Image: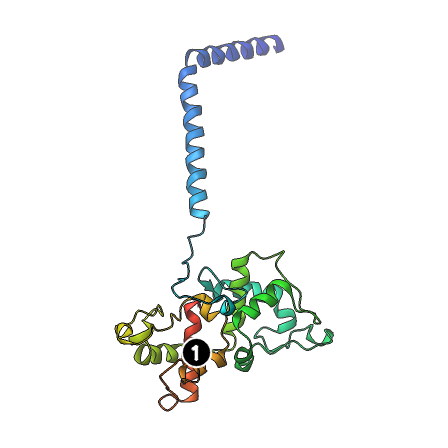
Amino acid sequence: MARIAHCLLYERAFEIAQYVIRNRRYLVLVLLGGVALGLISCSVFSRSATPEPRPTLPLVGSVEPQDLPDFYPSELASAGRGRPIFEKLCAECHGDTGKGDGPRSGQLGIHPVDLSDPGVRDKVPVSWYFRAITNGVVGSAMLGWESQLIEQQRWDVTFYTWSLASSPESIARGRELYERECAACHGKAGLGDGPHAGTLAQPPTPLADPRYLAGRTGEELRQAITGRVAGLDHDWSGKLTQDEQHAIVDYLWTFLYTP
């Protein structure tokens, strides 16, 4: 019986081999078709997995070298993308809302700064935040993350951190005020191309230029609004309350990031 079984197996194997030989050209076509489908699938997957290009920020002004900030973003940052980075790398010390009350804050020797305090943004520009996240802060427990985060990730977490000192309500109010009081000269998108721009003795500042905004503190921007800057001939201090000035400044930052 075993010999009969072996003979049957050999006969079946021989028949299969003959079929493959007779139809090898079809087999080759099937194999090539499978490879082609695999390549197409990989190509489609790769394209779908590639992130969409991020909007670049406009460089429309002329900035003197002495006024150029050390760092400024080239692409629109995202606080939404920065939030999970903050929660993973920063909240342990700075706390979930940036108040400096993270679980490790009491072990650092120097208490972390309260990032939710708008007064901090009055004293330093956003480029300083980026520098601190990139290189760390000498004399503190703040480490630099340049080796672990690419530049755009550092800008994303920078602006998420920056956004902790404002609110959606303030930004919305600031947008309303900006479009009503400022856009006629500075342009709706902050490019200095508003309908009244051509009637002015000097071109309006292109507020959306990252080289301008990244190097300005909140206090400097409010001084520009109230006319307390050399060369400005407008003063909105009597027309806008302090809260309204703060709201406009909160909105101006969104030329560089999406909240």
Question: What colouring style does the render use?
Answer: rainbow
- What residue is shown at x 48% (from left), y 79% (from top)? 220
Identify which amino acid the numbered label 1 is placed on.
Val
Q: Nearer the viewer, residue 137 or 112?
A: 137
Furthest residue toward bottom = 238
x, y percent for residue 240? 37, 88
Q: Secondary structure at mark 1?
A: helix
**Picture layout, residue 120 above or below residue 5:** below
Q: How many marks?
A: 1
Indicate the quadrant where residue 171 lies. Answer: bottom left
Instruction: Quadrant for residue 198, please give it.
Output: bottom left
Q: Residue at x 35, y 89 (%)?
A: 239
Residue denoted by label 1: 249
Neighbours of disc 1 within 10 Å: few (<14), some (14-19), many (20+): many
Q: Position of residue 8 (x, y in %)?
A: 54, 10
- Percent across and percent down for residue 141 are 70, 70
**Residue 15 visible:** yes
Residue at horizontal 57 percent and vertical 76 percent from the top: 115
Residue 247, placed above or below residue 137:
below
Closer to the camera, 47 or 203? 203
**Residue 169 visible (yes or no):** no
- Where does the N terminus fall, quadrant-wise? top right
Q: Position of residue 256 (x, y in %)?
A: 44, 67
Q: Is residue 128 left or right of residue 106?
A: left
Q: Nearer the viewer, residue 252 or 162?
A: 252
**Frontmost residue, 166 versus 92:** 166
Whether 111 is drawn above or below 11: the answer is: below
Q: Quadrant of the C terminus?
A: bottom left
